[in-house]
Amino acid sequence: MTIRCEIVSQDRTVFTGDVDIVVLPGAAGEMGILPKHAPVLTTLKYGIIKIRKGGREELFTVAGGVAEVQPDIITVLADAAENVEEIDVDRAEAARKRAEEALSKGVPADTDVYLAMEAALRKSNLRLDAVRRYRKGGMRMPTSEN
Amino acid sequence: MASAREMRLRIKSVKNISQVTRALETVSASKVRKAINAVTATRSYATKAWQVLKHVAEQPGRDSLHPLLAKHTSVKTTLAVVITGDRGLAGAYNSNVIRFTAHRFDQNPVPVKYIAIGRKGRDLLIRRRKDVIAEFSNLPAAPTFMDVSAIGRLAVDAFKNGEVDEVYLVYTDFINMGRQITTVKKLLPLELGGEGRVEEFEQRSSNGLAAAYEYEPDQREILDEIIPRFTALQIYQAILESLASEHAARMIAMRNATDNAKELVSALQLAYNKVRQQGITNDILDIVGGAEALSAK
């Protein structure tokens, strides 16, 4: 018994496949979705999506978005999403530095610009955090939740 | 027959034109490649978002779920968002969109307002004396969602405050380099089935009708967030589709123009050679005639 899972970000399809369980960082807390789950529509927080398939686990960072759960399919519409294994640490680090520098120069007058900068910082922190926590030593089971 | 000098000028000007069209073709070819990348990259997200919206629209008691889902009791005004290009020289691309729009909305039972995206569409709509309430032109070559979200907001607001009672989107769907299809899509209120290409592969629970959602955090908040955004996203996607179509149409049109110019040049060249040869023959005849006349004396 599997459930289809599709993760798409705004610029590409990040993951698609039949899986056993998906754990989503829902707005009201982590939620594990098994096949035949009741329909749910939820927003997502910044966090990690965990997908388990036949004993193997895959992890994805997600920077907010929406997930729709139907009994036979989970659709994740992420603002940005990435497989933890694919994260380019150097680029994420550079992005974090850039965002921090920009923010340290003071708060810009334009709220939209400020929000975008803050989002960039949060996103790169999330990616770096995910790499640190989950990638070392290959695929090990995460023991603590964030 | 025209004089040799006139023909030489004509050949030269046709050659010049073919150089321009060839340059435009090359430029469009590189633009179309970028546009295709952009449109295919976002297509899966937009399709999925549309699917989610449709599932939301299938919910029992949808009219009371969110103002953007509610059908207005009487339809008094229609809004059409029409997407064309800023520039011409793209074959029948722009006029196809406008012709399609006229065909679809001229018989509309209620007054139609238009939002024109693209300068060509605006001009053509105004020339046909349509009620254009807003226009957006000079969009960047590779627009981001932020660049065009204002258009979506405008349409959503007009619907929300009752200024218009339904919103349609007219755009050109990019199928491949040789095929682009002018399409109309009903944006608001959301409808099942709808018009145009029903592209999505519907996945729903086996009993046919979608079961009621649980919402997290709560229904109002999540619908408030996703419905306007996903609606704006449909406009964004339509703009990307139209851009790719425009560049493809321009490239094909320019290629045809270059080919035609080549043919014209070779036909003109032949005619010119004949005229030139005729001139030489006449000159020789003159000289021979003159010499003959002298020697006969």
Image: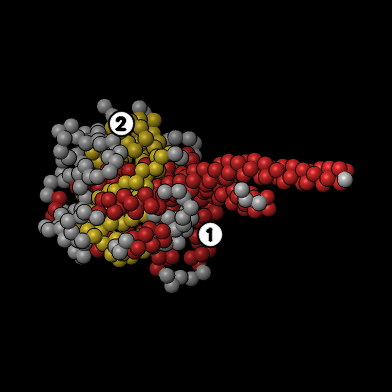
Q: As rendered, which of B148 and A23 lies closer to the eye?
A: B148
Q: Which of the image's four quarters has the C terminus of chain B?
A: top right
SS class of the residue under badge 1?
A: helix
- Kindly identify which chain the residue marked by label 2 belongs to: A
> Which residue, given by chain and number where applicable, does mark 2 sit on?
A20
- Residue drawn at x 26%, y 27% is A1
How is the rendered protein coloured? Answer: secondary structure
- In the displayed structure, B76 sits above or below B95; it is below
Name which residue lies at 28% across and 32% down.
A3
- Could you tell me residue B212's position as x and y percent? 15, 44
User: Which residue is disc 1 drawn over?
Assistant: A98
CA distance for labels 1 and 2: 39 Å
Point out residue B222 in the picture as x, y percentages from the top left corner. Answer: 24, 54
Q: Chain of mark 1?
A: A
- Per the rendering, the mark at residue B12 is none
Does residue B237 appear anywhere in the picture? no
**SS category of the residue bearing label 2:** loop
